[in-house]
Image (cartoon, grey):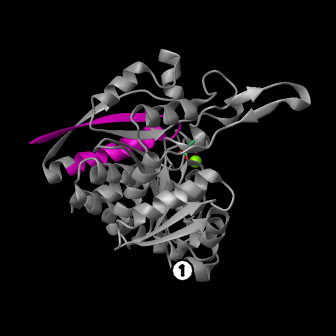
């Protein structure tokens, strides 16, 4: 039997409780698809601080290095404790640290409006009723988040702060290729988001993406300014299939697209690099306010595990199996508090998991 190693990093807040449910789903996949998962648990974020005095200890990195993929929960602490050593910079240290350490340059963030959840979308109902299925492909290890130099100098009124937006041709090309290749497996359209009317970096971005687009004549290519893209998302989200973005624009637009689905607790994400190795995490965050209550929605974590099976292990049938089970449970009316509506059956974290499990095993 094939053995695959998964580094399991539950992190903080609701991370551990939704992770527990996702692992149950993976266990069911093991028996159904005759594979063997070797889970290696490791600490990250605030959860690592007490033992290691670091948000991303070397031991955790080592476990990740020895694994085939990382299943990540979430990191972050309560708002009122944000300015303590334990929590200061926790997201940047853990997430940006892992992305950079493994050169996970491509971030895939699906934003799919489930018909059963259209009521939760902030969009006007005539727009949300049509549904949408968008994949934001965000460049994750370059751009203004990582560009050097960055810093502060001077003092008083003359004090300045600066960051550098910088992209190389190789960086743009490799992320553009990811976007065109996933689009080939979807609805064959790439909208590349830029600000080529103002920024030199983005003129270059548009030029390199255009060059790359010519290698994919079967995929429709369209450039769009970021301000327009933000607006088009709310007016006509159906026009988008794959949205290709640099690091900062992808950060912003992926949150916007996620919010339009009405259910942050539903959205998974994948961060991948050159090979099959990747890191998979829910989009929603650690939600410390509801941690430990057993009410968090485990679906984002479950769908992240499904993305892991797809992109790192190539287990497409198992992925679709999980996605189908999730959709069936929603159609059957089972809802955690975040996506609950009158007339639905309200369930907690564990029961939502069990309902999905039941359909997966049938
Ligand atoms: C995200 C987050 C991170 C980012 C932060 C927490 C560093 O917003 O994953 O989108 O900006 O990438
Ligand atoms: Mg973000």
Label 1, on which residue? Answer: 129
Point out the image quarter for the C terminus: bottom left
Q: Is residue 305 above or below residue 226?
A: above
Q: In this rendering, would 25 be left or right of 97?
A: left
Q: Is residue 175 above or below residue 82?
A: below
Residue 338 visible within the image: no
Q: Which residues are magenta?
A: 1-29
Q: Which is more toward the observer, 20 or 114? A: 114
Residue 202 visible within the image: yes
Q: Is residue 206 above or below residue 12?
A: below
The residue located at (52%, 42%) in the rendering is: 142
Q: Is residue 17 above or below residue 44?
A: below
Q: Position of residue 104 (x, y in %)?
A: 41, 41
- Characterize the local packing of mark 1: few (<14), some (14-19) or many (20 or more) Cα atoms within 10 angstroms: some
Q: Position of residue 229 (x, y in %)?
A: 61, 67
The residue located at (31%, 66%) in the rendering is: 324
């Amino acid at each position: 039997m094939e053995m695959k190693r998964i580094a399991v990093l539950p992190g903080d807040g609701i991370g551990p409780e939704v992770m527990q449910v996702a692992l149950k789903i993976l266990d069911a996949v093991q028996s159904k698809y005759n594979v063997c998962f070797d889970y290696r648990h490791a600490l990250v974020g605030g959860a690592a601080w007490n033992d290691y005095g670091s948000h991303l200890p070397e031991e955790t990195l080592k476990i990740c290095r020895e694994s085939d993929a990382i299943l990540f929960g979430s990191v972050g602490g309560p708002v009122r404790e944000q300015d303590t050593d334990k929590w200061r910079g926790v997201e940047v240290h853990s997430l940006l640290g892992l992305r950079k350490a493994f050169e996970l340059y491509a971030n895939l963030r699906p934003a799919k409006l489930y018909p059963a959840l259209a009521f939760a979308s902030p969009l006007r109902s005539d727009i949300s009723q049509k549904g949408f299925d968008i994949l934001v492909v965000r460049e994750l290890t370059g751009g203004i988040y990582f560009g050097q130099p960055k810093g502060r100098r001077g003092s008083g009124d003359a004090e300045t702060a600066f960051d550098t937006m910088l992209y190389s041709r190789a960086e743009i090309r490799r992320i553009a290729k990811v976007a065109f290749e996933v689009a080939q497996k979807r609805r064959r359209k790439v909208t590349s988001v830029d600000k080529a009317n103002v920024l030199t970096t983005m003129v270059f971005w548009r030029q390199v993406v255009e060059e790359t687009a010519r290698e994919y004549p079967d995929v429709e290519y369209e450039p769009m300014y970021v301000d327009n893209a933000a607006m088009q998302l709310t007016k006509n989200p159906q026009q988008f299939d794959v949205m290709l973005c640099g690091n900062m624009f992808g950060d912003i637009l992926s949150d916007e697209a996620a919010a339009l689905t009405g259910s942050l607790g539903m959205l998974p994400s994948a961060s991948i690099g050159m090979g099959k190795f990747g890191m998979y995490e829910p989009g929603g965050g650690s939600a410390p306010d509801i941690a430990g209550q057993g009410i968090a929605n485990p679906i984002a974590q479950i769908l992240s595990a499904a993305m892991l099976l797809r992109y790192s292990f190539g287990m497409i049938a198992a992925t679709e199996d999980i996605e189908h089970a999730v959709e069936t449970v929603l159609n059957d009316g089972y809802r955690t508090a975040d996506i609950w509506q009158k007339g639905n059956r309200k369930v907690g974290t564990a029961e939502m998991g069990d309902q999905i499990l039941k359909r997966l095993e049938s």
